Image: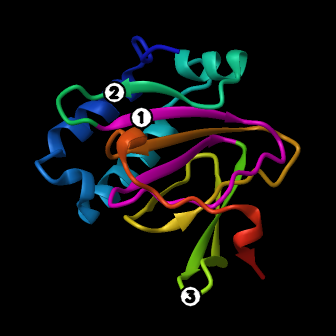
Amino acid sequence: MNEPAKDPAFERYIAAINSLWQPGSATDLNTAHRVRKLMGEWLHATTPDANWVRTLKAEKPSGVPIHTSSDHGFIQMSHFHAGFRTNTPHDHGPYWVVYGVYEGEVEIPVYAYDAANNTVKVDRIDRLKGGDAVAYLPGEIHSTRVPTPEPALVLRFLSTDLSQVPRQRFKPEQIVA
């Protein structure tokens, strides 16, 4: 899926992020919260006939970059999450991420890490519905799950390309009650 063509809401969103981005923004907590606010505004301003929404519903990809900043290195991803989909706990290393929901519902458990036992335990659960966005800060361990049979259209803003970043990932047997 390519960058959303001629979608004014998306273009305003990316322009606003570019204008606030500074050296060090990929690890800056204030930038994370500002991007979260901008994502929420974008989600509310996006109409169902937007190209990226139609494409996401038609193609149902598990994760596709819809914008990669060659100047700043951040990546805006789109995801189609099928009903009852779950992933395992992970973090984004020293970088932050913003999750948003355009349509549907997603629960994001946030975990406390027990280094002595190398286990994680749910500390809280964030519940997102259409138009909601939340930032997860460096080192915050989280996972996503769709708690309903209906799918969710999820957006994930990565403050950097995580493919080369050491990250913690946890297996289901490392989750304790």
Q: Which residues are magenta?
A: 74-103
Three-letter amino acid code of the residue under disc 3:
Ala
Three-letter amino acid code of the residue under disc 1:
Gln
Q: Is residue 107 above or below residue 163?
A: below
Which residue corresponds to the image point at 75% horizontal and 63% vertical from the top-left? Answer: 172
Q: Are marks 2 and 1 in contact (CB under 8 Å)?
A: yes
Q: Is residue 70 above or below residue 171?
A: above
Q: Where residue 15 sits in the image (x, y, percent)? A: 24, 31
Front residue of 116 and 81: 116
Q: Which residue is mark 1?
A: 76
Asked which secondary structure carries label 1, the reply is: strand
- As drawn, the label of residue 164 is none
- Whether 138 is among the magenta residues is no
Count up the numbered dots: 3
Which residue corresponds to the image point at 20% horizontal and 52% vertical from the top-left? Answer: 25
Find the distance from the CA under tag 2 to the CA under tag 1: 6 Å
Q: Earlier in the sequence, mark 2 or mark 1?
A: 2
Q: Residues within 10 Å of mark 2 (few under 14, many from 20)?
A: some
Q: Which residue is mark 2?
A: 68
Asked which secondary structure carries label 3, the reply is: loop
Asked which secondary structure carries label 2, the reply is: strand
Q: Is residue 149 left or right of residue 162?
A: right
Q: Which residue is mark 3?
A: 116
Q: Earlier in the sequence, mark 3 or mark 1?
A: 1
Q: Is residue 39 above or below residue 140?
A: above
